[in-house]
Amino acid sequence: MAVSEESQHLLFHSHVAFRTASMPSEVCEVEERKRENIRSLSMCGHVGFESLPDQLVNRSIQQGFCFNILCVGETGIGKSTLINTLFNTNFEEHEASHFCPNVRLRAQTYELQESNVRLKLTIVNTVGFGDQINKEESYQPIVDYIDAQFEAYLQEELKIKRSLFNYHDSRIHVCLYFIAPTGHSLKTLDLLTMKNLDSKVNIIPVIAKADTISSELQKFKIKLMSELVCNGVQIYQFPTDDDTIAKINAAMNEQLPFAVVGSMDEVKVGNKMVKARQYPWGIVQVENENHCDFVKLREMLICTNMEDLQEQTHIRHYELYRRCKLEEMGFTDVGPENKPVSVQETYEAKRHELHGERQRKEEEMKQMFVQRVKEKEAILKEAERELQAKFEHLKRVHQEERLKLEERRRALEEEMIHFSKRKSSCDIFLNQSFMASGSNIKKDKDRKNPNFM
């Protein structure tokens, strides 16, 4: 395998667009990364995607291929280790905490090369999934992220000047759903999440850390598949319509869910070094089909069915999203008489409908405005009547008070006149009395005077 020297360095950076289509504001948070690092990494061994030109014969080898994987599972269940093992590469991963307040999605794109085939691989990891006490809406950020990638692709399709040939397709092609090796049954969170994802992405369930289950593994697989069927969860089925791969895919469908073990550690077994996990009781070889289903998963996922996963993403999941979105926008294929309708006709009909709707709302607003003006006028008139009645009442009170004051003034003036008359009479009487008393005193003096007469 020839690995280019250029693949050991950072190639370029590209923007990742996260667009939501009418969703509720939030519950749970999706980590938006405005810039995503696309790194070229060296691989430690053979993977198998060099056979992609055989699957995708119409693609350009020089352009490379794009594959996007969503890993859903609880923190510490082994998602990063399995991805590293699948692609024989040590991807840079940040250590996740068990104390995330909500679920976030972290996307990272890498550029890998095997022989002369280039693969642009995007790994989307769910950070904090299953760590919250209230797990009621833990799946919602994942649904929002998948819809956001569909919306970004739809917006690119609807552009006048499209560039889909060079467009970095970020739609999720496969979801590896990691199931805890409990040996009992699926958790309610697992069933609820897969039920909400099965119409949006190809789900391949895997039993993580399968080396922790021994003789009960096959019973556990049967129980898991039975629960998925009973709850109506549609997982991805490997296609059997192609005669060249029908037999192996049919056999692999019976092996679902895959029980996998991941490890990048190499242990010497016999005369060769193999990837394995070493325990005090023995060694679990990752690529030994008698120990786990890792090789089956890698063959089905990368070497055999990558093209079908991409096609199913486009013709099934994306088309479902696109149809629902365009129907919400008012586009239809046939008219009322089941006749084909062109985009122009649909646009004109929608424009006419919106114009009529706008006029209707304007008329409603006008009527509402007139009604509110009338109500306000009635309120103001009522207030005016109340003020007028109050004014008239105060005017009457004032008039009565004025009349009372006038009456009291006249009475007071009459009293003053009467008092003045009495005062004058008293003054005259006093003067007369004083004059009379003066003449009497003089007579008495004259009598007492001996010389009088």
Image (cartoon, rainbow, N blue to C red):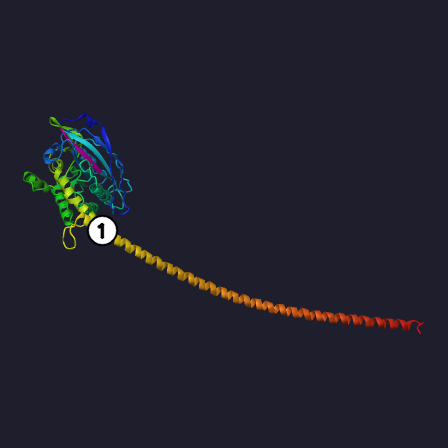
The one of 336 and 83 positioned closer to us in this rendering: 336
Q: Callout 1: helix, strand or loop?
A: helix
The one of 129 and 266 positioned closer to us in this rendering: 129
The dominant secondary structure in magenta is strand
Q: Is residue 294 magenta?
A: no
Occupied quadrant, residue 1: top left
Q: What segment carries the magenta color?
A: 115-124
Occupied quadrant, residue 304: top left
> Does 133 sit above or below residue 388?
above
Q: Residue at x 75, y 69 (%)?
A: 427
Q: Is residue 120 magenta?
A: yes
Q: Quadrant of the C terminus?
A: bottom right
Q: Position of residue 276 (x, y in %)?
A: 15, 32
Residue 160 horizontal side relative to residue 407, left or right: left
Residue on which the image places disc 1: 350
- The number of numbered badges drawn on the structure is 1
Occupied quadrant, residue 274: top left
Q: Amino acid at mark 1?
A: Lys
Residue 353 horizontal side relative to residue 247, left or right: right
Q: Position of residue 201 (x, y in %)?
A: 17, 43
